[in-house]
Image (spheres, rainbow, N blue to C red):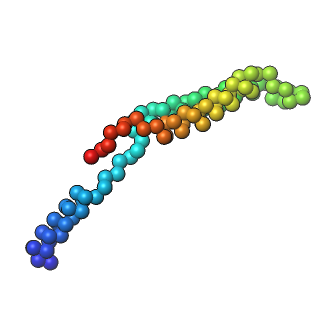
Amino acid sequence: MTAKQVIKAKEKAKIATKNAPKWHFPLEKKNFYVIGIGIGVIILGYLLMATGIGNQPAIPHGRWDNIWSVNIAPIVLVIGYCIIIPYGIFKRFNTTTHE
């Protein structure tokens, strides 16, 4: 290649990079904080569910008396999985466009 051809190739490359669309990662720092809170809520739900495990795991007639593991823990898990995590993924905190 001659020097003119090299210069033309570099100019074409600069023009192509200027006109190329820029891609930005859609999640921001706030999104990751919300997702982290959701993971914390999910861990809390599993810990609450584990409170039903006692010294007598085989209770006659399959009766569980712990309200935290039977009623509260599934609600906390549903909130974590179905509300907080999707909110952290889909919420757009920054509405300005990057130019």
Q: Position of residue 27 (x, y in %)?
A: 42, 41
Point 35% across, 48% down: residue: 24
Q: Nearest the camera: 20 or 68? A: 20
Q: Position of residue 50 (x, y in %)?
A: 70, 28
Among the 4 quarters of the image, the one containing residue 78: top right
In the image, taking residue 17 as reference, residue 84 lies left or right, namely right
Report the residue that reaches farthest toward the right.
61
In the image, taking residue 55 as reference, residue 73 lies left or right, namely left
Among the 4 quarters of the image, the one containing residue 61: top right
Report the residue that reaches farthest toward the left.
3
Q: Nearest the camera: 11 or 3? A: 11
Depicted 51 relative to depicted 6: above or below: above
Depicted 70 relative to depicted 20: above or below: above
Among the 4 quarters of the image, the one containing residue 45: top right
Point 61% across, 27% down: residue: 44
* Residue 18 visible in the displayed image: yes
Point 89% across, 27% down: residue: 60
Q: Position of residue 5 (x, y in %)?
A: 13, 74
Q: Quadrant of the N terminus?
A: bottom left
In the image, taking residue 33 as reference, residue 47 lies left or right, namely right
Q: Position of residue 19 (x, y in %)?
A: 25, 58
* Residue 51 visible in the displayed image: no
Give the mark count. 0
